[in-house]
Image (spheres, rainbow, N blue to C red):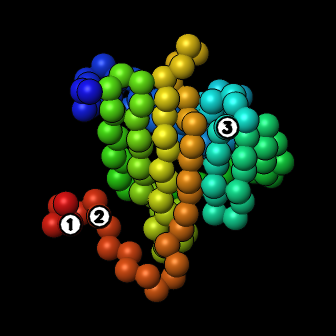
Amino acid sequence: MILNDPVALAAVTAAVDAYETALMGNDLEALDGAFWNSPHTVRLGVAENLYGFEAIAAFRKGRAGGSPLRTRLRTEITTFGSDLAIAHVEFRREGAESIGRQSQTWIRTAEGWKIASAHVSILQAGADQRLASLPENR
């Protein structure tokens, strides 16, 4: 197995960046297109547990205004061979002090790279929220 194959890493990095653009623009078609269209796809959010592509798509369609605006603070992507990748994003929502975390498992399908599993959470107020992206914390 090749760790961080340059071709796979570049493709997943582009997919993660495209997902972020779609998320901030509330581009439902692009967001749906980023997820694996399968009943096995899972997205665990800040206030929702969604099992299956249909539930994820329905959630996005029903969310007025889309995702709260945010700034990415750190993105870490690791590929395992040419068909599997894990992406972690640290972010801060506009006007919030708390740090958010997002993890995604990406798989390469016949249709391209797709999210098979995602998790989003916000650190609780008062939790140690040192930014791991600061050089002294690496």
Q: Left or right: where does residue 7 sit relative to residue 119?
A: left
Query: Residue 58, percent across and down?
Result: 82, 42
Q: Which of marks 1 and 2 is nearer the N terminus?
A: 2
User: Residue at label 3?
Assistant: 40
Identify which amino acid the numbered label 2 is placed on: Ala
At label 2, counting other C-alpha atoms closer than 10 Å, the crowd grade (few under 14, some 14-19, many 20 or more) is few
Secondary structure at numbered mark 1: helix
In the displayed structure, 49 sits above or below 53; it is: below
Residue 73 rendering spot, x and y as whole percentages: 38, 56
Q: Residue 132 carries which label?
A: 2
Say which of marks 1 and 3 sits in front. Answer: 3
Mark 3 or 2: the one toward you: 3
Q: Name the residue under label 1.
A: 137
Residue occupying the point 70% across, 64% down: 47
Residue 17 visible in image: no
The kind of residue on which mark 3 rests is His
Q: In which quarter of the image is the N terminus?
A: top left
Q: What residue type is labelled 1?
A: Asn
Residue found farthest to the bottom: 126
